Amino acid sequence: MRVADSMRYQSAMRQIADVRTAHADASRRALTGRRLAAPSDDPIAAAELVQVRSRSTQVDGQRSNIARVRGDVELGESMLAQAGELMGRARELLMQGASDQVGAEGRRTLGNQLQAIRDDMLAIANTKGANGYLFAGTQTDTQPFDAAGLFLANDSAHNVDVGTGSPVRVNASGERAFTLSGGRDIFGDLDDAIAALQADDGDAARAQLDNFDAGQQQLLTERGNAGLLMNRLDASDTALERAELLLAQRDEAVGGADAVEAYSDFVQLGQALERAIGVSRQLLSLGSLNQF
């Protein structure tokens, strides 16, 4: 082969190799929908993608946290609402028992009904959710109240990262809802009222009315706190969902490939490859290019 022919041969082979590389890249972009195959393709874009994906992972974790605790927060709010209603019903019974028109037998009957309410209140205070006892602080494996109504757990905050800049407490306070820490000992007041009715003591029953009012307000206050927490979780989740969408859009803008453009490049480069091979066949003998 002469020197000129050899140079043309090498030039033709380089052109074919370049077109093949570009064609393969276009094929990859069309198949994967991604512009970058390696950081070296565009170091600046690759660095931004690392940051975008790191933030996406963080947002996904924060949304998972919300999904994991939201059910228990909602259940806690519902239980406290029921507790408030029970306390209101208990006050109605106590008011009836405080009346001078009710005799000893009537007060004993009302006392039995109040005992049933107390049992229901204790069951509410010991409600267990998906992540353990709702009102036990961080001791979620410990039943917070014993049969006597004594608080056995703690009031420590269960803090979770929900994307608000600092961890958020996601557990309602059983201590503030049901014990003197909130103002009234709910079970102590119920026990005193039951004892007064069973003893046919109308004066003692009347003395408990204000305590029941305060107890009901105490339960409703903690329910309100749980409701505010639910609102905060929902607002955070909405903001994180929006961030998730924006991050996905940025990921696509930085590293994504236009599907139509990638397919068009694939077709055009395929045609260019065929033309380059055709030109090479015209320059060289078929024997030199039998690899094609």
Image (tube, helix red, strand yellow):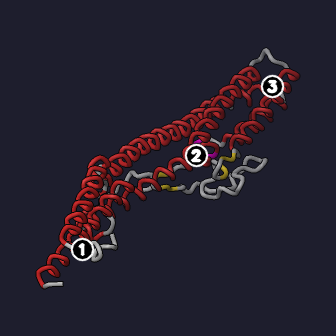
Residue type for callout 1: Ser
Helix, strand or loop at disc 1? loop
Q: Using the numbered discs, state the Cα–Cα distance from disc 3 to disc 2 in whole angstroms.
A: 28 Å
**31 or 266: nearer the viewer:** 266
Q: Quadrant of residue 70?
A: top right
To which residue does mark 3 refer? 110
To which residue does mark 1 refer? 285
- Give the label on residue 133, or none: none
Residue type for callout 2: Arg
User: Relative to residue 189, is residue 181 drawn left or right?
Assistant: left
Q: Position of residue 145 (x, y in %)?
A: 72, 49
Quadrant where the image shows the C terminus: bottom left
Residue type for callout 3: Leu
Residue 47 visible to the viewer: no
Q: Using the numbered discs, state the Cα–Cα distance from disc 1 to disc 2 in whole angstroms.
A: 93 Å
Q: Which residues are magenta?
A: 179-183
Helix, strand or loop at disc 2? helix
State if disc 2 and disc 3 touch (CB < 8 Å): no
Q: Position of residue 252 (x, y in %)?
A: 32, 52
Helix, strand or loop at disc 3? helix
Main SS class of the magenta portion in the image:
helix
Furthest residue toward top: 101
Q: Position of residue 6 (x, y in %)?
A: 17, 81
State if disc 1 and disc 3 touch (CB < 8 Å): no
Quadrant where the image shows the N terminus: bottom left
User: Relative to residue 197, is residue 251 drawn left or right?
Assistant: left
